Each structure stands twice: as C-alpha cells, then as structure tokens.
Image (tube, grey):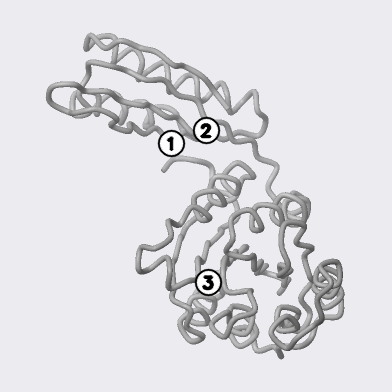
Amino acid sequence: MALQQGPKAWLLTIGNEILIGRIVNTNAAWLARKLTFLGFSVERIIVTPDDLEQIGDEIRRALSHGVRLVITTGGLGPTYDDRTLEAVALATNRRLVLNKEAYEMVLAKYSQGGMQMTKEREKMAYMPEGAVALRNSAGTAPGSWLDLGSTIIVSLPGVPKEMEAIFEEEVMPRLKAIAPQLSVVECGFKVVGVPESSLAPFVEEAERKNPGCYVKSHPKGVEVGNPILEIKVLASGNTREEALTKAMSALEAVKVGAQKLGGKISEEGCS
C-alpha cells in the first residue's frame, strides 16, 4: 500500500461467537474504514476468544509495537465471560476499579426502566484505573477511554449499534484532536468485459506512478466468461484537493488501460 502512513491503529474484536462463525465481524470493517478516513494506518484486525490471557497478550503486543491507538470491541456486558476491561487492566498493570461516572451512567439507564442495580449490572461500571467512561446512548454498557500517553486504548461494546453510537458521539471528537492533518478520499469505477489478469499491469503501474495512492481491483463477475471489475483508488494528501488530484490521476491511468482492452466503464464516483 502506497498511502501516506498515519498513526498506527490495531483493532481487537473479542468474542467466541465471532470465532465459531455465528456472528460476522462487521464491527472491524466499519471501524477500519472510519479510522482510515481519519488518517490512521490500520495495521491489524485481530479476533480473540473471551479469554483473559489471550486478550491481554494482544494488548501487550500492541503496546510493544508502539501502536498509537488500540480499539477493542466486545466483552463489556454483564455476563461472566465479559472480561475485556479486566484484561486491559492486567495488560497495563492497573487496578480494575469501580468508575464513578460509569456507575452513574449504568444506574441512570436501569433507573429509567424501573430496575434496581445488581452485581451483574454494576459489573459494567468497573474499568481500569484512570479510564474515562464513554456514554452509551444506544445501550447500557459504557465504553472506556484509557490514555497511556504513547498509546490510547478504547474499549467499545460488541453490539454494532452501541459501538457505532459511542464511536461517533464520544470517540470521534477525541480522535480528531490527535489525528494527523491528512485528507483521505476514495474514488472508483466499474469496468465490464476485462479480466482482472489483463488489467493487472495497468493497476500496478498506476500505483507505482502515483505515490500516496492505493490502487486495487475487485472482481465482481467471472474472470473467464463474464469479467466485471470494481476499481478503487484510496489516496491521501495534505488537503482534500491534493488527495483528489492524486486519486483521479491514478484512476485515469487504470481507465485508459481498461478502455484499451475494450472494457466498458460505468459507475464512476468519489467519496
């Protein structure tokens, strides 16, 4: 990938249900795209079971690699196997303590429903010492923001609507303060009638001649018989205009190649 490199980020998805194939890991894909467009360089997407030691091992590994941002999803709920924040505490040599702000958030949620606090509900308010509780507008379990100085560990619920709500409302504003002054855009088009293997040299040349771009072809049809390709260019620059200029230059190079090979171009656009 030839994109300008931003601060390193790792995504850690936690849950046995992911590993046995019961649940599709949509959280990681959603977060990876959000972070990429914020200017972070997502280097790892890791899935672990609900195992204290394995979660802790991955967090310690991220710290040893100098990762700027670690985001975990899953394991913040009231059940016995929700142990993510306990693992974060152990991996960072901190105590797991009752967080006053988190407790008030959980208490308010259950009080609104006319329910009393129980030890299982109170469990969701325990966080690593020094963590900041993140309000969950879509559910009950608060998120956690732990700033270690060189690394920030953010822990979010596994329920997608809750994860997305906390990220958009609580995490995004904080990340913008540390994100690089970098604009990232994505442009693309669809080409029909050209096999991926035929277009491959043009894709490689477009990336090589356009620093700051990641050029990729995605097959959507059948290589031999009914080839359909989606071409995507991800480009970064100091401004959106600069990133767009890079993206369009690379995209045009691939488009010229596709047309030389007799391909039909459609569905062009940028985001």
Q: Are marks 2 and 3 in contact (CB under 8 Å)?
A: no
Decide: few, some or many residues near mark 2? Use Cα within 10 Å; few <14, some 14-19, many ≥20.
many
Q: Considering only vertical position in the picture, is 217 above or below 154?
A: above
Provide the secondary structure element on which disc 3 rests. helix
Provide the secondary structure element on which disc 2 rests. strand
Provide the secondary structure element on which disc 1 rests. strand
Q: Considering only vertical position in the picture, is 157 above or below 169?
A: below
Q: CA separation, marks 1 and 2?
A: 6 Å
**Residue 103 in the image: x percent, y percent?**
82, 78
> 210 or 141: nearer the eye?
141
Q: Residue at x 38, y 68 (%)?
A: 19
Q: Are marks 1 and 2 in contact (CB under 8 Å)?
A: yes
**Residue 17 in the image: x percent, y percent?**
43, 69
Q: Mark 1 highlights which residue? A: 214
Q: Is residue 50 left or right of residue 159?
A: left
Q: Mark 3 highlights which residue? A: 62
Q: Considering only vertical position in the picture, is 165 above or below 13?
A: above
> 219 or 137: nearer the eye?
137
Looking at marks 3 and 1 on the same chain, the residue that comes earlier in the sequence is marked by 3
**Residue 214 in the image: x percent, y percent?**
43, 36
Q: Mark 2 highlights which residue? A: 235
Decide: few, some or many residues near mark 3? Use Cα within 10 Å; few <14, some 14-19, many ≥20.
many
Q: CA separation, marks 2 and 3?
A: 26 Å
Say which amino acid is labelled 1: Tyr
